[in-house]
Structure formats: structure tokens, C-alpha cells
Amino acid sequence: MGPPTPSKLLQHHFWVLQPHLWSSSTHLWVLQPHLRSSSTHLRVLQLHLRSSSTTYGSSNPIQAPPAPTYGSSNPIYGPPAPTYGASNPIYGPPAPTYGASNPIYGPPAPTYGSSNPIYGPPAPTYGASNPIYGPPAPTYGSSNPIYGPPAPTYGSSNPIYGPPAPTYGASNPIYGPPAPTYGASNPIYGPPAPTYGASNPIYGPPAPTYGSSNPIYGPPAPTYGSSNPIYGPPAPAYGSSNPIQAPPAPTYGSSNPIYGPPAPTYGASNPIYGPPAPTYGASNPIYGPPAPTYGSSNPIYGPPAPAYGSSNPIHSPPAPLMGPPTPSMVLQHPLTGSII
């Protein structure tokens, strides 16, 4: 057939080499797990690399893990400061002791006189310096005047909620009982004063006699000159000391200048409603009659000056004439000789 052709030589070599190729394939399959193992190691190393990149203070501040220690420079997601006085005052734990520098979330001050006056416990003793929530003062005269108990005795220094004063003249003028006797020092709710001149001027009975010291509700003063000027009767005579409702003064010069009658004569002391002054030069210059003569001292309403050259240049009349005709002013007719 002649020598083998190249294609046959190749086929022969292929069959000769095939076992070796299978052996190489076996080696490849044998190496593949190692390669996979190397890939696993690569992934492990990658995780280690990633783990080593996850350190605090990463240049990627958004996804970096929370800072693992106190005082982290990443103040947003760092852990709460683990000790008192942390420099992270927002999320730090409450201050563990009294007088903590974190006054907002610290615990209530555990002792009396705490410097945390808002949430501290009520002061445990009388006269606590925490006047808002302290307990009621346990004794009379407590310095806590708002919530202390009612003062147990008369004259208590707690004037707001103390009990009614048990005796007359109590120093608790608001809620004390009505004063039992005349002249009580409790002028608001005491009983009406039983006698004339009571010192309780608001609710006392009307004073039974003239000149009562209760000027508001006393009866009208029964006589002239009553000391009760508001509701007293009209003074029955001229010159009454009750100038408001007294009758018009019956005579000239009445001391009641508002409602007295017009003064009947010239120069009345009641210048508002007196009659016009009847003569020239009246002291009532507003309503007096016009001055009857020239040169009147009442220059506003005086009559016009009656003659030429009057000192009243505003209302003087025109000069009446220029004097009689002079001879030079007479004319004669040249023919008849009559005066023209």
C-alpha cells in the first residue's frame, strides 16, 4: 500500500497519545479540587482582606462599622459612651451619680438639696430647699407657704390655707371667721358692726345717727352739715357743706357755685351764671352789657366811639363834615349876579 499517509500517521499518533491525554485529563480532574481549594483559599484571603479593611476610621465614613471604642471620631453611629461624663452627650448613658454633668437624663438626685432641682425627689425634711415638690411643711410656720398644711394655731404665718382664725382679731384676714365683736380686724367677712361707728365700713349696718363713720351705706344725714356728703339729704340752709345735692343757695354769694341761683347783683361771686353786669366796667367781662360810653374798658363789646378821632379806631364813625363852604368856593352868574 506504500508508506502510511500523513493522515494515517496522525491517527496512529493520536491512538498512541490517547492514553496520555486521558492521564492528563485525569491529572486535570485531580488538580481541579486543588484549584477549587485554591479558589476557596483565595476567597478566604479576600475575606481576610475585606476584614482587614474594616477598621475604625475607614475613609468610607458612610458604611464604616460603628466605631468600636469610646470617643470615636464617628459621632453619629459610634456606640454610646461607656462611662460617665462621656464626650458624646447625646446618647451617653445617664450619669450614674448625683450631680452628674448630664443634667438632662441623669437620675433624680438621690439626696436632699440635690443640684438637679427638676427631677430630684421631694425634700425629705421641713424647710426643704426644693420649694416646688417638697412635702408639706410638718410644723406651724413652715417656710413652704404654698403646700404646707394649714397652720394649726391662731396667727398662722401661712395666710392662704391656714384654718380660720379661732378668735377675734385673727391675723388670717381672708378665711378667718367673722369677727364676733364690734370693731373686728377682719373687715371683709366680719359681721355687720352692731353699733354706730363700726370699723367694718363695707358691710356694717347703716350708721344709726348723724355723722356716722360708715360714709357709704349710712342713712342720709338727718341734719344740715352731715359728714356723709354722698347720700345725705339736701342741706336745708344756705352754705350747706353738702355741695353736690344741696338746694340752690338762696342768697347772693352762695358757697354752692354750681347749682346756686344766678347772682342777683352786680359783681356776683358766681361768674358763670350770674346776670349780666348792670353797669359799665362790670367785673364779669364775658356777659356784661356793652359799655355805655366811649372808651369803655370792655373793648370787645363796647359801642362804636361816638365822635371822629375816637380812640377806638376800629368802630369809630366817619368824620361827619369838612366844615362850612369858603367864599372862594361861591360862584355868581355873570349876567344876573345870582349865586350859582
Image (cartoon, rainbow, N blue to C red):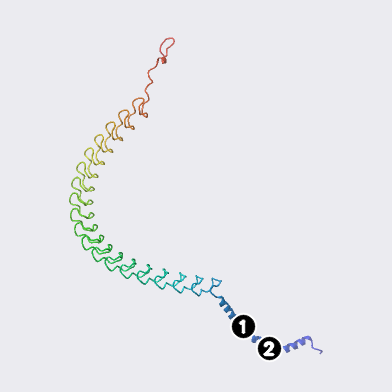
Picture quadrant of residue 270: top left
Vertical position of residue 157 compared to residue 199: above or below: below
In the image, what residue occupies the spot 62% across and 85% down?
34
- Image coordinates of residue 178 in percent, x first then y, are 22, 60
Q: Residues within 10 Å of mark 1 (few under 14, many from 20)?
A: few
Q: Estimate the spatial distance between the alpha carbons at disc 1 and disc 2, rounded to whole Å.
A: 22 Å
**Horizontal placement of 336 versus 151: left or right?**
right
Horizontal and vertical percent for residue 258? 26, 41
Q: Amino acid at mark 2?
A: Ser
Q: Residues within 10 Å of mark 2 (few under 14, many from 20)?
A: few
Disc 1, SS: helix
Rendered residue at 61%/83% (across/down): 38
> Which of label 1 and label 2 is nearer to you?
1
Q: Quadrant of the C terminus?
A: top left
The type of residue carrying mark 1 is: Ser
Q: Is residue 92 above or below residue 250?
A: below
- Furthest toward the right, the residue is 2
Q: Residue 169's quadrant in the figure?
A: bottom left
Element marked by disc 2: helix
Q: Which residue sits at x=78%, y=86%?
A: 6
- On-image quarter of the N terminus: bottom right
Q: Residue furthest top?
A: 335
Q: Report which residue position mark 1 lands on.
A: 38
Which residue is tagged 2?
23
